[in-house]
Image (spheres, helix red, strand yellow):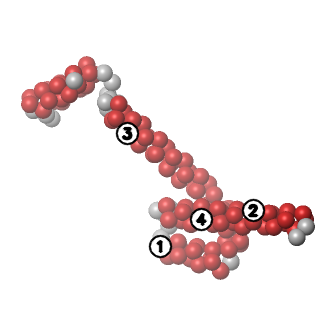
């Protein structure tokens, strides 16, 4: 095996890897798309098996923008969940300091949404 064959083999391996990355990205997007019916998803999978390159290009052209929007929405949701978790672990619920939490609890108490006992418990947690 000479150097040219080695480079050719590397190029082939690269394209195979790239093909599978795109294929799995399309399949993951198919299953995350809630606007398509099960029949449409099945037809796309069959097309990806029978005529892989043509169906991949057609899917990317017709659903490329929606793929990006779903990916961005999922990333934003993950970021919000991470921030909520960090606030929870840090001891703040996004409501600010203890006085803001007590004020919000007092509003709930005066509106009748919570009882005096629940307000006292909320106040104790905020001051702790």
Question: Farthest residue in the front direction?
Answer: 1
Q: Which residue is mark 3?
A: 85
Question: Quadrant where the C terminus lies?
Answer: top left
Q: Which residue is mark 1?
A: 38
- Counting residues from the start of the chain, the first of labels 3 and 4 encountered is 4
Q: Does dot 1 land on a helix, a strand or a loop?
A: helix
Please name which of the two marks, 1 or 3, marks the residue nearer to the observer: 3
Please name which of the two marks, 3 or 2, marks the residue nearer to the observer: 2
Q: Which residue is mark 4?
A: 24
Q: At x 59% / y 65%, what residue is drawn?
A: 24
Question: Quadrant where the N terminus lies?
Answer: bottom right
**In the image, residue 93 above or below residue 45:** above
Q: At x 58% / y 56%, what residue is drawn?
A: 67
Query: Picture coordinates of residue 44 (x, y %)?
Result: 58, 73
Query: Picture coordinates of residue 95 (x, y %)?
Result: 32, 28
- Counting residues from the start of the chain, the first of labels 2 and 1 encountered is 2
Depth order, front residue of 62/102 = 102
Does residue 116 appear anywhere in the picture? yes
Q: CA distance from mark 4 to mark 2?
A: 15 Å
Residue 48 lies in quadrant: bottom right
Q: Which residue is mark 2?
A: 14
Confirm or deny contact between disc 3 and disc 2 (CB under 8 A).
no
Q: At x 50% / y 76%, what residue is drawn?
A: 39
Left or right of residue 15: residue 78: left
Does residue 107 appear anywhere in the picture? no
**In the image, residue 81 above or below residue 67:** above
């Amino acid at each position: 095996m000479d150097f040219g064959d080695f480079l050719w083999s590397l190029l082939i391996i690269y394209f195979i890897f790239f093909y599978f990355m795109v294929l799995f990205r399309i399949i993951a997007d198919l299953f995350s798309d809630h606007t398509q019916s099960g029949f449409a998803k099945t037809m796309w999978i069959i097309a990806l098996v029978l005529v892989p390159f043509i169906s991949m290009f057609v899917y990317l052209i017709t659903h490329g923008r929606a793929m990006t929007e779903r990916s961005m929405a999922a990333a934003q949701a993950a970021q919000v969940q991470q921030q909520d978790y960090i606030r929870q672990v840090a001891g703040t619920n996004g409501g600010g300091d203890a006085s803001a939490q007590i004020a919000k609890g007092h509003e709930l108490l005066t509106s009748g949404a919570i009882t005096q006992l629940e307000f006292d418990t909320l106040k104790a947690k905020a001051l702790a």
